Image (cartoon, rainbow, N blue to C red):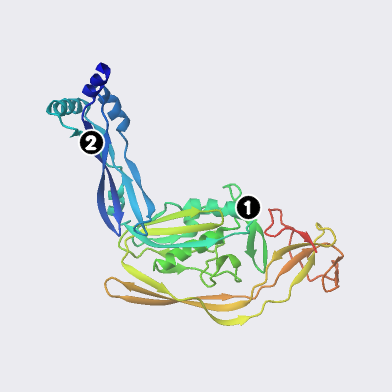
């Protein structure tokens, strides 16, 4: 009983303080404080407890707030304590019989906290876009992740024209990219950096949905299954063929990327002074895909098939965009994409018999001159098979 009495006598008042963070919600900055409580068993514990509770400031990060159903920018203010003053306040509260006392705390801001981004005009989500690449080879997935990472954190100042080629830099094996399928001329072949068009297409969509002026953009030669809905793709072939768009907003724009197992996403954050709507793609005409071609590859055994091109119908596709500015202006534009009809191509072994009964040889195949198709060295989109 004596020992218990001593324990109760030594247990003193709790120290309380507010851990603070700054948030940008719906374009407005707010400071939020969360009450923290430290149990103090005696004056000798104060220094150790306050040292443990001290934390450095943390830079702001965009996170999705489930309650608001929106992206918010959140930082963490650092805090430290005046230990000598805390001892004094503890003893005064203990003497007065108080159950708690306010700890002397000093808060510090991160140099890249919410205030910094707010002053830069990076205040809310402008738009985001996601595309999917399920079924892609390892090499193509690798290139998409690497390319997207190079654009993560890029900032566009007001009036700046963004260049995909300039921001991406050199795309080569020397800089870490791998060979994967690319469209070259009239065929799909292996080339270093295959998958960059998935990155450019996704980034283009986020810029387009943000209502930014598109300065330079070209659709792919044919409709690619990864880029549905059709009419919203952007082909690049670096450094010759570029994607460009302009920041005509009042503030800076921050580009952020994320890559999932089968998807890549780009988000643009800035000052939202417009709302954007766009139509579903409107197909003006359709041209059937040409017949499937079978071409002999000396690298494949008889009755083996390796698909290197996929059928796609030709079409002209329009997407209509309307931009309504907060100052009352309304802008409308039309995004037109023209796609060529594209035929499926299979590489087969010499002497392969097709389902139709035709036997394919190098002398009778559907190669058009020097067709240039080679058996892929990457992990194939669709593996060679017998049928």
Return the residue nearer the eye: 179 or 77.
77
Q: For the view shown, which residue lies furthest in the bottom direction?
A: 285
Q: Relative to residue 27, is residue 93 drawn left or right?
A: left
In front of the other: label 1 or label 2?
2
- Mark 1 — residue? 139
Q: Relative to residue 222, is residue 65 drawn left or right?
A: left
Q: Is residue 234 above or below residue 7?
A: below
| Residue 359 spot, x, y in % from top left | 86, 70
| Residue 33 spot, x, y in % from top left | 25, 45
- Which quadrant of the structure image shows residue 228? bottom right
Residue that appears at 33% across and 60% down: 158
| Location of the N terminus (image quadrant) | top left
Residue that appears at 31% across and 40% down: 57
Q: Relative to residue 196, is residue 366 drawn left or right?
A: right
Q: Is residue 148 above or below residue 233?
A: above
- Mark 2 — residue? 16
| Location of the C terminus (image quadrant) | bottom right
| Residue 21 spot, x, y in % from top left | 29, 45
Q: For the view shown, which residue lies furthest in the left direction?
A: 96
């Amino acid at each position: 009983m004596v020992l218990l009495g001593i324990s109760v006598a030594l247990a003193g008042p709790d120290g309380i303080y507010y851990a603070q963070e700054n948030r940008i919600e719906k374009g407005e900055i707010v400071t939020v404080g969360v009450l923290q409580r430290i149990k103090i068993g005696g004056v000798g514990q104060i220094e150790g407890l306050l040292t443990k509770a001290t934390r450095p400031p943390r830079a702001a990060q965009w996170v999705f707030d489930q309650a608001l159903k929106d992206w918010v920018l959140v930082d963490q203010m650092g805090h430290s304590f005046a230990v000598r003053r805390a001892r004094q306040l503890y003893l005064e509260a203990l003497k007065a019989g108080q159950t708690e006392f306010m700890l002397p705390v000093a808060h510090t801001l991160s140099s890249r906290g919410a205030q910094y981004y707010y002053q830069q005009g990076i205040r809310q989500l402008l738009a985001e876009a996601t595309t999917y690449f399920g079924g892609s080879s390892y090499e193509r997935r690798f290139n998409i992740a690497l390319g997207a990472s190079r654009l993560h954190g890029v900032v566009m100042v007001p009036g700046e024209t963004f260049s995909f080629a300039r921001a991406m830099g050199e795309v080569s094996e020397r800089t870490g990219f791998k060979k994967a399928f690319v469209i070259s001329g009239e065929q799909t072949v292996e080339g270093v950096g295959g998958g960059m068009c998935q990155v450019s297409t996704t980034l283009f969509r986020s810029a387009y949905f943000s209502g930014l002026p598109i300065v330079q953009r070209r659709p792919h030669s044919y409709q690619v299954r990864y880029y549905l809905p059709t009419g919203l793709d952007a082909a690049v072939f670096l450094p010759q063929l570029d994607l460009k768009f302009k920041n005509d907003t009042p503030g800076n724009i921050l580009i952020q990327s994320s890559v999932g197992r089968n998807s890549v996403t780009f988000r643009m954050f800035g000052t939202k002074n417009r709302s954007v709507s766009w139509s579903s793609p409107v197909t003006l005409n359709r041209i059937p895909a040409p017949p499937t071609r079978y071409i002999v590859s000396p690298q494949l055994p008889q009755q083996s098939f390796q698909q290197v091109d996929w059928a796609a119908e030709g079409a002209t596709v329009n997407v209509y965009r309307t931009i309504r500015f907060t100052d009352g202006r309304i802008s409308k534009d039309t995004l037109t994409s023209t796609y060529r009809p594209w035929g499926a191509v299979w590489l087969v072994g010499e002497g392969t018999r097709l389902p139709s009964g035709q036997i394919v040889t190098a002398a009778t195949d559907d190669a058009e001159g020097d067709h240039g198709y080679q058996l892929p060295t990457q992990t194939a989109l669709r593996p060679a098979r017998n049928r």
